[in-house]
Image (spheres, rainbow, N blue to C red):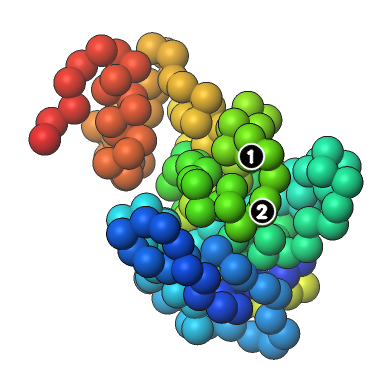
Amino acid sequence: MTSGTLLAVCRVHELLPTRDSTGVTAIDKRAVAGPVNVHPLGLTGDVQASRKHHGGPTKAVYAYSQEDADFWAAQLGRDVPPGLFGENLRVGGIDASHAVIGERWSVGDQVVLEVTMPRTPCVNFARYLGEKSWVKRFSEANRVGTYLRVVVKGSITAGDPVRISSVPDHGVTAAQVYAGLDEARALALLDAAAAGSLTLTPQVRKAALQALKVAAPA
């Protein structure tokens, strides 16, 4: 069983204005001390300004690896503290970007999370970070982290162990979904879903169908 550490738990510090129809973004997340409750829509005290793009049950929690943050710190020549990329969980020793779709993480003594899909960078992320061509750079590096659904709610605290408790046999990762699926990986995901061993988000199902050149249902 692979294990790592929950280095920080992050939630919204301040809502910032945007130029889109939502009007605000909750990307400004900061690490908080003490236990934080996790429920089906995310962390207590956190906000997702647009649940269409960044929230809801299938994107309740966003995790990012310290190893990827270290890569960006070197690339950007600046610190990448927990929460800077809008993540809720900063983890060490767990590769969030290459987590397998449907993989389950046990965090602390109570919480169980399930990997659902990669994060897609947006213009608000780029404006917040203030780095030139940021969406393109972040995408090309494909160190995107992963969203997770909440399987078992409970309380988590920085320093808790993170254990990968199960990994689906299909082997397709969040980074592979983000990079674009080939036919074999698309079939592996759809077959796993058809067998009842995996629940695909609409976005991942659409990506798999598009890879097979099959029109996704409306």
Q: Is 140 on the left-hand or right-hand side of 189?
A: right
For residue 168, side relative to residue 128 (left or right): left
Q: Looking at the image, which is closer to me, 31 or 36?
A: 31
Percent across and percent down for residue 198 are 35, 41
SS for dot 1: helix
| 213 versus 89 height, above or below | above
Query: Which mark, by number, is residue 179?
Result: none
> Which of the two residues, 19 or 11, is positioned nearer the viewer here?
19
Callout 1 touching callout 2 (CB < 8 Å): yes
Q: Which residue is mark 1?
A: 134
75 to 109, vertically: above or below: above
Residue at the (18%, 27%) spot, across then down: 216
> Is there any visible trace of residue 17 in the rendered image?
yes
* Other residues around mark 2 within 10 Å, as few (<14) / some (14–19) / many (≥20): some
28, 4: nearer the viewer:
28
Q: Quadrant of residue 95?
A: top right
Residue appearing at x 83%, y 47% in the figure? 73
Residue 157 occupies quadrant: bottom right
Residue type at tag 2: Leu
Residue pictured at 43% horizontal, 68% vertical: 24
Residue wearing tag 2: 129
